[in-house]
Amino acid sequence: MANDARMEIRDSFKARAIGTAGGCLMRLIAATLRLEIVDAAGLASYQGPVVYALWHEDIFVVPAGWRKAYGRIRRAVILTSASHDGAAVARAMSLFGLGSVRGSTSRRAVAALVAMKKSLREGYDVCVTPDGPRGPRRVLQAGLVKLAQSAGVPVVPIHLTYGSAWRLNTWDRFAIPKPFSRVRVVFGSMLAVPPGLSDDAFAAERAHIESVMRRDTPPDNPHPQTP
């Protein structure tokens, strides 16, 4: 019974309604933002699939940034948890044309990995928040590295800079940009994960990707405000 519970994908009308409301709010605020997109990865001309890596705190803006930059030329799915919260996030992402794969390190990890590799084979980009769904904040879990390595695709780190934003009092200090503010979304240079790494080399690769993401992630607003 315990294994069955861990494999269960949770969903409900309430979760979908919350997701719809959240996605509408995201689209409403995004419509007011001065979004600057930097394509350092060259995704506008790159033909193969990639794995996007972004911190959990930045998920409010990235779907709008991705849709503005690549929504007409690339397809993508995002990994969300198998919980009711994950169902809400999946519904919100669908409003930006993003599909979803349900699972996490604690529930449906293997099934989610298989589904993400299938999506990559079919030409979809896969978006992962490697410190989600529960943290620790800005600590990259190894699953993203395993996915990129086993699928033979590069990692594209996504970095955000907020002109002005609220920070929620949550484990990830979730960021909500203030309406009409400027947000810079950088799709960073591609990072290749070599095959056949030893355990030590794999750990070093994970640490390297995490260091790139941390290095290019600006510190929080020195005077964050909580709505």
Image: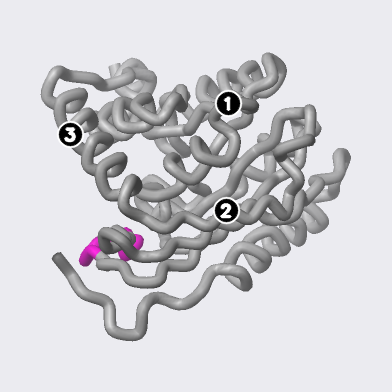
Identify the residue at horizontal 72%, vertical 63% (top origin). Answer: 208
Please state the horizontal and vertical placement of residue 184, each as a whole percent of the image: 51, 61
Q: Which mark is residue 133?
A: none
Q: Which mark is residue 72?
A: 1
Amino acid type of the residue that numbered disc 1 sits on in the rendered structure = Arg
- Secondary structure, mark 1, is loop
Q: Does any portion of residue 43 appear in the rendered image?
A: yes
* Residue 102 occupies quadrant: top left
Asked whether 219 or 87 is in front, the reply is 219
Q: Which mark is residue 37?
A: 2
Please state the horizontal and vertical placement of residue 189, each as a whole percent of the image: 74, 54
Amino acid type of the residue that numbered disc 3 sits on in the rendered structure = Ala
* Comes first in the chain, label 1 or label 3: 3
In front of the other: label 2 or label 3? 2
Asked whether 123 or 5 is in front, the reply is 123
Furthest-bottom residue in this view: 222
* Comes first in the chain, label 1 or label 2: 2
The magenta segment is 168-174
Amino acid type of the residue that numbered disc 2 sits on in the rendered structure = Ile
Identify the residue at horizontal 40%, vertical 48% (top origin). Answer: 59
In this rendering, the answer to whether 21 lies above or below 144 is above
- Secondary structure, mark 2, is strand
- Secondary structure, mark 3, is helix
Please state the horizontal and vertical placement of residue 26, each as a whole percent of the image: 29, 43
* Comes first in the chain, label 2 or label 3: 3
Q: Which mark is residue 21?
A: 3
Q: CA distance from mark 1 to mark 2?
A: 15 Å
Please state the horizontal and vertical placement of residue 227, each as a whole percent of the image: 14, 65
Q: CA distance from mark 1 to mark 3?
A: 24 Å
Identify the residue at horizontal 30%, vertical 61% (top origin). Answer: 180
In front of the other: label 1 or label 3? 1
In this rendering, the answer to whether 200 lies above or below 143 is below
